[in-house]
Image (spheres, grey):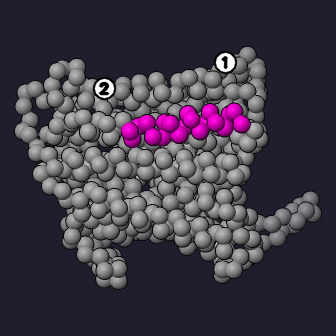
Amino acid sequence: MNEAIQLIIFLVALVLLAPILGKFMAKVFMGENHLLKPVFGWLERSVYRVSGIKSEVEMNWKTYLFGILLFNFIGMVFLFLLQIFQVWLPLNTEHLPNVSWHLAFNTAVSFMTNTNWQSYSGENTLSYLVQMLGLTVQNFVSAATGIAVVLALIRGLTRKTTDELGNFWTDMTRTVVYVLLPLSILFTIILVGQGTVQTFSHYITATTLQGVHQVIPLGPAASQIAIKDLGTNGGGFFNANSAHPFENPTPFSNFLIMLALIIISAGLVFTYGHYAKSKRQAWAIFITMLILFAGGLALSLWAEYSQNNVLNIAGNMEGKETRFGVMNSILYSVTTTVTSNGSVNCMHDSLSPLSGLVAMFNLMLGEIIFGGVGSGLYGMIIFVFITVFIAGLMVGRTPEFLGKKVEAFEIKMAILAVLAPSIVIKLFSAIACTIPAGLAGLNNAGPHGLSEILYAFSSAAGNNGSAFAGLNTNTVFYNLMMGFGMLIGRFGVIIPVMAIAGNMARKKITPESAGTFKTDNWLFVLLLIGIILIIGGLTFFPPLALGPIVEHFLMNLGVTY
């Protein structure tokens, strides 16, 4: 009963807070007066003055995209250099060595693409300086990049006959100054109050009751954890991530972290509604996301509480923290995989096969069920384009969305955005399954071993960052393959989205007529859900059948791997 009450409170909080945050963000990005402008306005103006940004000058889609690519490339190179030279830099209290070139490449790409995949143990690999100046900074700007892209797309959909999509540097600045920074400060204070560590002290050596010496890692963790969750980044300060008591100490901190994972992504849906001047459009997309989220959560909870014939128990606690229990572990696993966050509070490798399937399928859909901040919404709008196109074919009418015709160019770009991460998942997994370098780090054989590889590349392509944790990926092969997979998964979607934004912005808005296909009612919601599930099912059913589905049936027969 207590777990059911906690779940209801979580869902109610999400539904109530998302529209409020969405309205606030709409005011921020539209340049209107809002609550935090008197408090942080000086900081925004200082950024423009120091950097020479002309905030009022808008860009076309190519200039906007160039700014995105240039800024992210510079950030990736900077983080790479920090890692390979960390032994000569300050705030390396534990005298950690330089990071290998291939791991530094993987980590730099990972945090730049908002993936935060970690092939390393944070407390044993990276200094305080790299954690703060490298990882934490990228947590802010990679999240801001995703929001900037969706803002450009929204303007392209809602403006008419223009080339102007806003200013990338202005959107980045306002996102960090008014949204991410204030929320992170507030969340950091709350986490410290719950017991999350925030210190520059050396690691502590303690003596256990058995007389064994144990090294207890410390560090400025709370500040990084706040933005990693709010920005759907996900990288853990410690290797155990949000299962670590210094990252996620209490059930209350666990609840707040789960809400932080999803709230900005959910709020951006209502920001879109304010731009489109239609609350119904926003609610249609939000309800679509919520139904898919609830469906996956229900299946995952049912699977986890069902009888496990291998262990001969129901409600398996293997790989879970006792202070969270089964429900909070499963709610976290679903929330983190639908939101492109990737932080974990339990071992996904220990989930039941169907619970693991839900987490993996969330990644494979392209992180569109709320998704990453910004990236989830523009990914969902890609599926909206495909849905209105198919609906137009069925009724024999040129498809439209928000009064603009959806033509061949938009559909080609939409299909490209869907295919890019899908190719990474299937092709890269196939390569890994057929060469010794790909099989060398497996912890399990059979279908579970396939799931470990499939999940890793799904996480990379979806820019999620979570792992089954049964696969050693700190090798040259996996660091490079997953690094390239993250790049394709991020920019293989962003580039087509920006092209769509630019093309749609130049179009006229035609008045609604009796033949217009409504995109703000229950019929559209059900059709959109159907298209998402059909595309996901057709694309990924074969590998899922060979992995978690077959493992589920074998588990019922008492067979495990």
Please name the residue that numbered disc 2 is placed on: 527
Q: Name which residue lies at 17% across and 37% down.
A: 405
Residue type at the position of mark 2? Leu
The quarter of the displayed image where residue 146 is located: bottom left
Q: Within 10 angstroms of label 1, few (less than 14), some, or many (20 or more) residues?
A: few
Q: Within 10 angstroms of label 2, few (less than 14), some, or many (20 or more) residues?
A: some
**Magenta-tinted stretch:** 416-435
Numbered disc 2: secondary structure: helix
Q: Marks 2 and 1: in contact by CB < 8 Å? A: no
Q: Residue furthest right?
A: 211
Tell whether 528 sits left or right of 129: left
Question: For the stretch drawn in magenta, what is the main secondary structure?
Answer: helix
Numbered disc 1: secondary structure: helix
Front residue of 425 and 316: 425
Q: Is residue 433 magenta?
A: yes
Front residue of 203 and 173: 173
Residue 374, disc: none
Q: How many marks?
A: 2
State whether residue 85 appears in this view.
Answer: yes
C-alpha distance separating marks 1 and 2: 31 Å
Q: Residue furthest top?
A: 557
Determine whether 130 is above or below 12 in the image.
Answer: below
Q: Name which residue lies at 61% across and 56% down.
A: 106
Q: Pick the quarter of the image with the N terminus.
A: top right
Q: Position of residue 57 (x, y in %)?
A: 21, 70
N-terminal-most mark, 1 or 2? 2
Determine whether 453 is above or below 500 in the image.
Answer: above
Q: Is residue 452 magenta?
A: no
Residue type at the position of mark 1? Phe
Q: Name which residue lies at 25% across and 29% down.
A: 389
State whether residue 313 appears in this view.
Answer: no
Please name the residue that numbered disc 1 is placed on: 553
